[in-house]
Image: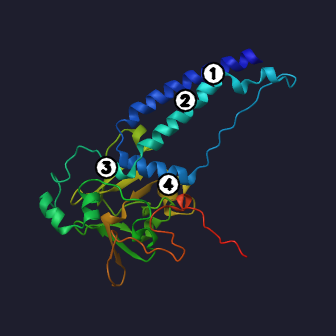
Amino acid sequence: MRKTTTMMMNRLLTTATTLSALLLLQITTIPSSSLVHSFTSWTNTNAVSIQTRRYSKNNNDDDDDTNNPRRRQLLQSTLSFGTLLTTTVNPSAAYASSSKSRTEGYAVQRTEREWAYILSGPQYNILRMGGTERPNSSILESEDRDGTFVCAGCNTPLFSSAEKFHSGTGWPSFAMGIDNNVQVEKVNPVQASIAGAELRCATCGGHLGDVFQDGFLFVGTPAAKSGKRYCIDGAALVFKPSGGGEDVFGDVTPPRTSDGGGGDLPGFLQPPKIVPRSS
């Protein structure tokens, strides 16, 4: 039994090492902004459990395979790969790394100085620099009224409220864009599956966010039908309510709740509430 288990561990270790190497080759070419959106969604929709089976013969502790060096190496390799993904996704340094110009070939063109003048700081960071805002930092994440979400840089209609849903990631999410107004980066299938593809406004080239192929996870939402999740940085958008009313700019931070929460972190990262002890 012990010999069979050891052989299995050797094969698993070899397979895990090979897969990790292949994935690393792909991840090194993936924009960190995509990894931020992808990893946050993954942690919020999946529960990861690592269970260690104990192989023993006649309850003999000497045959306990949980202390097998090969097994420990396999588990450590798996966890190290997960740690790599975690440390890679630093929101403060997450920028789309596409080499394609955000000016050439687009109908609306301005100098960077002009963009910096007409856009707010958060808008410029997202649209022109390809940055990524913190989750739950845009008031548009909770916007549920009927209307249209337009580009904050050129006013192009990008998303309909009918395609908006709550993904739990902390970023405004949509099942699809309006017509061909949202440009999708062409990437290889591996990257598209792991970390999505960059989205831009097709009129001005402004960075919007990323699209992922995990829409099927959000049962009961428009994304379940389209199979896609458009994860958008709210600061790149302006919401125009149907039937008139004031525009809502996505670079506005949502108000904090009475208990001090909201506006900064998604629910699964919020600190626990402190309940005072009754006397």
Can you identify the residue that label 2 sits on?
77
Disc 2 residue crowd, few under 14, some 14–19, many 20+, Cα 10 Å:
some
Identify which residue, 50 or 108, lies in the foreground: 50
Q: Is residue 148 left or right of residue 219?
A: left
Residue 52 percent location from the top left of the image:
70, 34
Image quadrant occupied by the N terminus: top right
Q: Residue furthest front?
A: 279
Disc 4 residue crowd, few under 14, some 14–19, many 20+, Cα 10 Å:
many
> Which sits earlier in the primary sequence, circle 4 or circle 2?
2
Residue 220 percent location from the top left of the image:
57, 63
| Residue 172 visible to the viewer | yes
Identify which residue, 255 or 242, lies in the foreground: 255
Q: Are marks 3 and 1 in contact (CB under 8 Å)?
A: no
Can you identify the residue that label 4 sits on?
215
Up-down relation of residue 248 to residue 20 (above or below):
below
Q: Quadrant of residue 259?
A: bottom right
Q: CA distance from mark 1 to mark 2?
A: 11 Å
